[in-house]
Image (tube, helix red, strand yellow):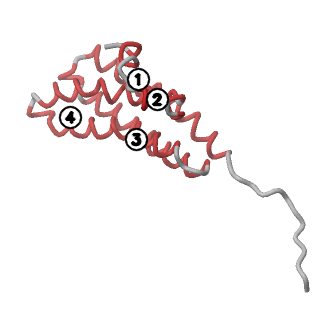
């Protein structure tokens, strides 16, 4: 299934949320969804069962942390969760590389490319959020002495 086909299967309760506008979230959700088949294949080989668990957890963590960060009230809080997502995306990419012996080079190359794109987006989002702070206008405070 390609991204366009997958997107048609996502319920409107998700696509109508403003979070859906975040490209990194959409790509991460897609990656976790198609990762299901990869993990299922890895579970059939006893040597990669623990790898499958780690991969599925890290894939799911990317979109979950983007979603949680998106809901935070300050840029600093959002950036922190986007950094968690960044770590999970890098972790997923690492697990995919290790899974290449079972999944095959073509699948792994595609999945690593997806994670790399998500990483690139997050690396732009994090500093943007860090720059967003609520600042009070400079005012002269008068105190009675």
Residue at image position (33%, 37%) is 60
Q: Quote the CA–CA distance across marks 2 and 1.
A: 6 Å
Q: Position of residue 63 (x, y in %)?
A: 41, 36
Q: In the image, is residue 99 above or below residue 141? A: above
Q: In the image, is residue 106 above or below residue 44? A: above
Q: Name the secondary structure under disc 4.
A: helix
Residue at image position (87%, 70%) is 141
Q: Nearer the viewer's eye, disc 2 or disc 3?
A: 3
Q: Position of residue 136 (x, y in %)?
A: 78, 58
Q: Position of residue 113 (x, y in %)?
A: 40, 21
Q: Name the secondary structure under disc 3.
A: helix
Q: Name the secondary structure under disc 1.
A: helix
Residue at image position (55%, 35%) is 123
Q: Nearer the viewer's eye, disc 3 or disc 4?
A: 3
Crowding near the residue tagged with mark 2, few <14, some 14–19, many ≥20 C-alpha atoms within 10 Å: many
Q: Quote the CA–CA distance across marks 3 and 1.
A: 17 Å
Residue identifier under label 2: 118
Crowding near the residue tagged with mark 1, few <14, some 14–19, many ≥20 C-alpha atoms within 10 Å: some
Q: Quote the CA–CA distance across marks 4 and 1.
A: 18 Å
Residue identifier under label 3: 64
């Amino acid at each position: 299934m390609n991204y366009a086909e997958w997107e048609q299967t996502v319920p409107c309760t998700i696509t109508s949320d403003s979070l859906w506008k975040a490209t990194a979230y959409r790509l991460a959700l897609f990656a976790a969804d198609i990762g299901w088949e990869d993990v299922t294949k890895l579970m059939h080989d006893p040597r990669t069962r623990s790898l499958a668990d780690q991969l599925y957890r890290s894939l799911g963590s990317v979109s979950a942390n983007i979603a949680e960060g998106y809901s935070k009230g300050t840029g600093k809080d959002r950036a922190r969760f986007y950094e968690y997502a960044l770590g999970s995306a890098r972790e997923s990419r690492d697990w995919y590389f290790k899974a290449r012996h079972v999944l095959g080079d073509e699948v792994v190359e595609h999945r690593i490319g997806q994670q790399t794109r998500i990483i690139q987006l997050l690396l732009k989002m994090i500093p943007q959020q860090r720059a967003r702070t609520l600042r009070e206008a400079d005012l002269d405070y008068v105190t009675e002495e």
